[in-house]
Each structure stands twice: as C-alpha cells, then as structure tokens.
Amino acid sequence: MAHVFENKGKGPFKCIRYYQHDDKGTGCDHCGTGIKHVFVIQTADGNEFNVGSSCVEKVGEKGLYDEAKQVKRLAIREAKRQAQEVKIKAMLDAQRVKNGGLTDSELMRQKEENELKIQSELLNPYANRLHDGKGGFCDSIADQMMRGIAPTGYALVLTLQILAKQAGRKGSKAYTAAHDELKLKFPA
C-alpha cells in the first residue's frame, strides 16, 4: 500500500521545520485546507511540502508525528528565545541612549569603579601609615584600603586605634585628637 504522501515524493518522509501563521493563509499541500500550524515535510529525494497538524497526525506514521511534535516544540522554544533576545536588546539599547552609550549595569560599574578610585586616593595615606610589611592584620587592611575598601566593624575600631597610637600613647591628648580626627575620615 502506498504512503499517503507518495504523490509528493519517495519516502521515508521527515519533518524538517515548523512555523506558524497569524491566520490560516497557507493551504495544506496534502488536503488543501488553510493551515495556521505549518509542518514542512521533506521526501527522501529532497522535495519539500507543507502540511497542517491534522494531516501529520492522520498519516498514521507515529515516527513522523512524534518527529513533527518535537520539531514544533523546538521551533516554539527558539521563537521564545529569540523574542526574549529582541526584548533584552531593545531594553539595553534604550539604556545606552539614556546613559550616553552605557547600559545601566555598565554605568553602575563605572560609578562604583570611580568611587573606589576616589576612596582609594583618600585612604592611601592611611594605608601607607598602616602597612608594616609583616603580612598580618595591618597589611591586610592596608591592601584593602589601597583598593578603596575602607575597614568596617571591629576592623575599623582596631585600625583607628593603631593609627591614633602613631600620634601618641593611648589616653594621651595627641592620641585622643588623632583618634577623633580619624573617626571623621572613616565614617562607620
């Protein structure tokens, strides 16, 4: 018995592509019905023809039907991915127009880098004073300060004490004055 698609070419038949119309503008090459969901079938000799989902299902060839469902799933997934890509590109393009060529994240990163640079310039003199070359706490905090990262929490308390002790022993007027001045430069 001949395959129902034999008039289109020799089997085996393979579903190679799927696409969708907004309306039923394309006619099925097998039954002539207008179709919205178009499956492109390829014959063994390379001919291609379009059929609708009903004809793919009614052929009775489970392998071709399963293949058509898989091709449709993949096509829909790819269409969604492309639509998402277009949406993201449009959003990024709008951000670039608004931000003089930079996306919001690029602009934020640039601002953060500028702030770190400024912070680093402010902290460098203190980092140099703190750096002792022993590879311990003082060097660790000094390295962070050189990168623009100010100490926080208990590390800040210790840093202020160490720097203030360079002005005088703890409890002296020189220590207290230096500690008070440093507290203004290292906001918590």
Image: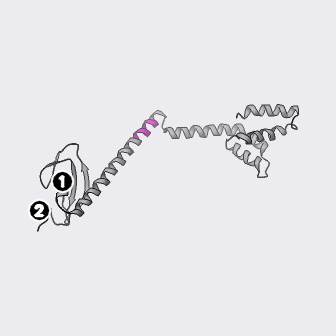
Picture quadrant of residue 59: bottom left
Who is closer to the viewer here, 38 or 112? 38
Count of numbered marks:
2
| Residue 2 visible to the viewer | yes
**Residue 52 shown left or right of residue 108 in the figure:** left
Magenta residue span = 89-95
| Residue 52 visible to the viewer | no
Residue at the (51%, 40%) spot, across then down: 105
The amino acid type, in three-letter code, at marker 2 is Asn
Picture quadrant of residue 160: top right
Q: Secondary structure at mark 2?
A: helix
Up-down: is 5 above or below 23? below
Dot label at residue 7: 2
Picture quadrant of residue 8: bottom left
Residue at the (46%, 33%) spot, across then down: 98
Give the CA distance from mark 1 to mark 2: 18 Å
Q: Nearer the viewer, mark 1 or mark 2?
A: 1
Residue at the (77%, 43%) spot, across then down: 128
Which corner quadrant holds the C terminus? Answer: top right
Q: Which residue is mark 1?
A: 54
Q: Secondary structure at mark 1?
A: helix
Q: Is residue 154 a member of the stretch shown in magenta? A: no
Dot label at residue 34: none
Which corner quadrant holds the N terminus? Answer: bottom left
- Residue 15 image position (x, y, % from top left): 24, 59
Q: Is residue 91 a member of the stretch shown in magenta? A: yes
- Residue 137 image position (x, y, % from top left): 76, 48
